[in-house]
Amino acid sequence: MTVDVPRISARVRILLWLLVVMTIALGAVAVTVRSILHRDVEHRTSQLLSQETGEFANFVEQGVDPDTGRGFGDPRKLLQTFLRRQYADPDEELLGLPRSSVSGRDVIRQRRDFPDHMALWRDDRALSRIIASKDSSGTLHRSQGELRWPRSPSGRWVTIPPARSSSPSTRTVSGPSPTRRSGR
């Protein structure tokens, strides 16, 4: 007893092979485009963070206290003035941490409408991890999403020049809030 197996015509076999090849090609294109777009977002995010820290470093060097007309002598006043003048995107949270803020509790921030569960300034654990890091920038993975942060370009502490103050005393944290992962 022989079982007759229906033969697949040459046309159908060619069509199936073409379908398989096209599926693999489209999959490869999708993966390639995704990787290019992901790299572009990473690059733009890094540029934006560098721009923010560069603006702060420039402000430290050239900023003038509006009350005295001279350079800043008080790190808290410097941070407050800088943050007041910034126009952050809706997905950015700009913070300043005075040196005394070892626990992250003394945070100088812009008044923004962030949900409490998303706001970095309310997340003591995340702030402590950023403060403890020896890196000049990094990525923090929180349950709310990924957060990219930089410090000022001069290192861990921004030093107010001796003519203005006698001690180095501020650091900055700036970065996109985790409400949106992609760049602009």
Image (cartoon, rainbow, N blue to C red):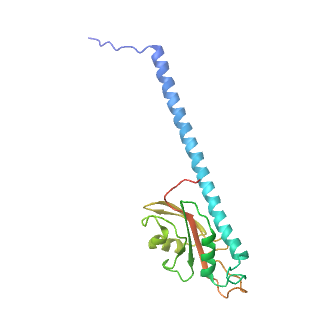
Residue at the extreme bottom of the image, as rendered: 166
Q: Is residue 21 above or below residue 98?
A: above
Residue 147 in view, yes or no: yes
Residue at the extreme front of the image, as rendered: 67
User: Where residue 179 sits: x, y (%)?
Assistant: 49, 58
User: Where residue 138 sits: x, y (%)?
Assistant: 56, 65
Depth check: give the residue in front, 139 or 147. Answer: 147
Depth check: give the residue in front, 151 or 6. Answer: 151
Image point (51%, 24%), residue name: 18
User: Where residue 9 sits: x, y (%)?
Assistant: 44, 13
Q: Quadrant of residue 152?
A: bottom right
Image point (51%, 67%), residue name: 112
Q: Quadrant of residue 100?
A: bottom right
Query: Going by the image, does 50 lie left or right of 143?
Result: right
Total tally of numbered discs in the picture: 0
Residue 153 in view, yes or no: no
Image point (56%, 37%), residue name: 29
Say which quadrant the N terminus sits in: top left
Q: Is residue 30 above or below residue 71?
A: above
User: Where residue 71 sits: x, y (%)?
Assistant: 71, 81
